[in-house]
Amino acid sequence: MNTRGVSLIELLIVLSIISVLALIAVPAYLGQQKSAARTEAYSNLENLRLLEEQYFAENSCYYKNAGGVCTNTSVSGTNNVKAFLPGFKPGDTAALSFDYSLSVYAVSGANAGGFTATAAGKTHTRVSGDSFWINHDNSKNF
């Protein structure tokens, strides 16, 4: 009997154990990556809400046009939102998993109104098709 080597059966058993462990670990790892990408959206949406509330505290409405009148507006695209609210710094736009937009509406004849901030998952990312929002009442879908 030769005891110096590893038999083919022993090798196949080790390979099957490793493959079973990989089948369990890989989906869990991918799920954690998706969860981390979603956390980006949750954090940035909360930040947008706070910045809009700060704008409201300073201007008595969520958006004033060039004439100083509270009015409706829609700002889409992360770079445009950053220009509207300079305090919004979500990071490198190209590296983000979500694209952000903001819809502001004024109540006619009053300085009140509201807003909804939205995060939409970029195509060709793990979160493609995901969409989250938060509004002036702190109602949210996450």
Image: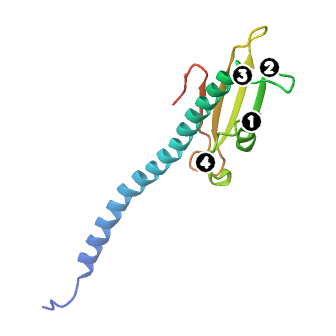
**Residues at discs 3 and 4 in contact (Cβ within 8 Å):** no
Residue 49 x/y as whole percent: 60, 29
Q: Find residue 131 and report its image quarter.
A: top right
Distance in Å between CA atoms under marks 4 and 2: 30 Å
Residue at the disc numbered 2: 71
Q: Which residue is mark 4?
A: 97
Whole-angstrom CA distance, mark 4 to mark 1, is 21 Å
Q: What residue did someone put label 3 on?
A: 59
Residue ID at (63%, 27%): 54
Residue closest to the far right: 67
Residue that lies at the very extreme toward the top in this rendered image: 109
Residue beneath label 1, please?
84
Image quadrant occupied by the N terminus: bottom left
Q: Amino acid at mark 4?
A: Ser
- Element on which disc 1 rests: helix
Q: Secondary structure at mark 2?
A: loop
- The secondary element bearing badge 4 is classed as loop
Classify mark 3: helix, strand or loop: helix
Residues 130 and 112: in front is 112
Q: Nearer the viewer, mark 3 or mark 4?
A: 3
Q: Earlier in the sequence, mark 3 or mark 2?
A: 3
Residue in the foreground of this view, choosing between 98 and 28: 98
Looking at the image, do the residues carrying marks 2 and 1 touch, with CB atoms under 8 Å apart?
no
Task: Tell me if mark 2 has few (under 14), some (14-19) or many (20+) residues whose alpha carbon lies within 10 angstroms of its own.
Answer: some
Identify which amino acid the numbered label 1 is placed on.
Phe
**Mark found first going from the N terminus, 2 or 1:** 2
